[in-house]
Image (spheres, rainbow, N blue to C red):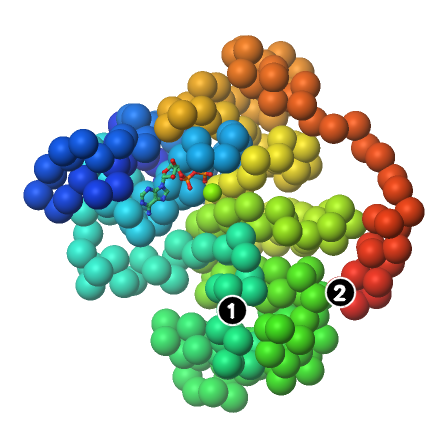
Amino acid sequence: MADALLAARGLVVSYGAGRLGRSGSAPVILHGVDIAIGKGETVGIVGESGCGKTTLGRALLGLVTPSAGTVVFDGRNITALDERARRPLRRRMQMIFQDPMSSLNPRRTIGQILTEPILLHGLAANRTAAISLVYGVLDRVGLLRHTIERYSFELSGGQRQRVGIARAVVLRPDFVLADEIVSGLDVSTQAQVLRLLKELTSEMHLALAFISHDLSVIRSICHRVVVMRDGGIVEQGSCGDVFSAPQSAYTRMLIDAIPLPTVDSGWLGRSTAETATTI
Ligand SMILES: Nc1ncnc2c1ncn2[C@@H]1O[C@H](COP(=O)(O)OP(=O)(O)O)[C@@H](O)[C@H]1O
Ligand SMILES: [Mg+2]
């Protein structure tokens, strides 16, 4: 891709390989992965549990050091940056976590959780200015302003994930990694969160790597899809191409496994309550 914002070439990751490059008997988790994500593009990364999706995401963000290969962000090789050199990139590369319950500190109010990174990265001159940015982002993600006084455990799953999204986008990043962020939500809340994310990526021209084991979710939000299996990429292409004419038998199997939509009374009961509290 000519104008890739984030590109990895030949990424090899093996946990426990050691900083001196001693791979020993550590199993290789990623086997030479190539991936490129354009400015403003949403790329889905799909595959069964354990195939290496999270490891790939962590390697793109520099949270795990590859034993071979390169990661280039905005034209700069960022593969082996130390923490100090990486710090200015932290604002530009954000992450939304799978489980907001464990990623949002239960001892801090949502207001504290959202203002801290704003002040840390110098996006507001003082606390009052930071809070005004927080109000703006709460409005945008569909949360009431008094949410700043709440703690994460007082919120619904959908509301917590909106806070996770707010925390990422309030820093005006260029790239966001979202790892299984709707997996714990019921179907109607999933749809609301996905719609919000789609609007935000378009408004902010955000590049998004969207990890999911669920192809139907990928299809609803992504421009392109990368299919992983056993630490490698088996297929990638536009969602239209991959869904209508998958090239690998493995991708076809994943597509065939998408359940047909079903509605049951339990789902309706849950979604009504959730909808009322998240809008
Ligand atoms: N911190 C770690 N240390 C050792 N092995 C790990 C670690 N994290 C993940 N793995 C292993 O790497 C493989 C890929 O895991 P992961 O990237 O989490 O896959 P996915 O996100 O697709 O489910 C799995 O076999 C997992 O057990
Ligand atoms: Mg994972």
Report the front residue among 17 and 142.
17
Q: Residue at x 50, y 81 (%)?
A: 107
The answer to whether mark 2 is within 8 Å of ligand 2 is no
| Residue 24 in the image, given as x and y percentages of width and height | 14, 33
Dot 2 falls on a residue whose secondary structure is: helix
Residue position for label 2: 278
Residue position for label 1: 104
| Relative side of 256 to 132, left or right | right
| Relative side of 20 to 56, left or right | left
Which amino acid is tagged 1?
A: Leu
Q: Residue at x 50, y 35 (%)?
A: 49
Which amino acid is tagged 2?
A: Thr
The reply to whether callout 2 and callout 1 are in contact (CB within 8 Å) is: no
| Residue 34 in the image, given as x and y percentages of width and height | 34, 27
Question: What is the C-alpha distance between the residues marked 2 and 1?
Answer: 18 Å
Dot 1 falls on a residue whose secondary structure is: loop
Label whose residue precedes the other's in the sequence (2 or 1): 1
Which quarter of the image is occupied by the N terminus?
Answer: top left
Q: Residue at x 51, y 81 (%)?
A: 108
Q: Residue at x 26, y 32 (%)?
A: 27
The answer to whether mark 1 is within 8 Å of ligand 2 is no
- Whether residue 141 is visible here, answered yes or no, is no
| Residue 220 in the image, given as x and y percentages of width and height | 68, 36
In this view, 245 is above or below 64: above
- Whether residue 198 is visible here, answered yes or no, is yes
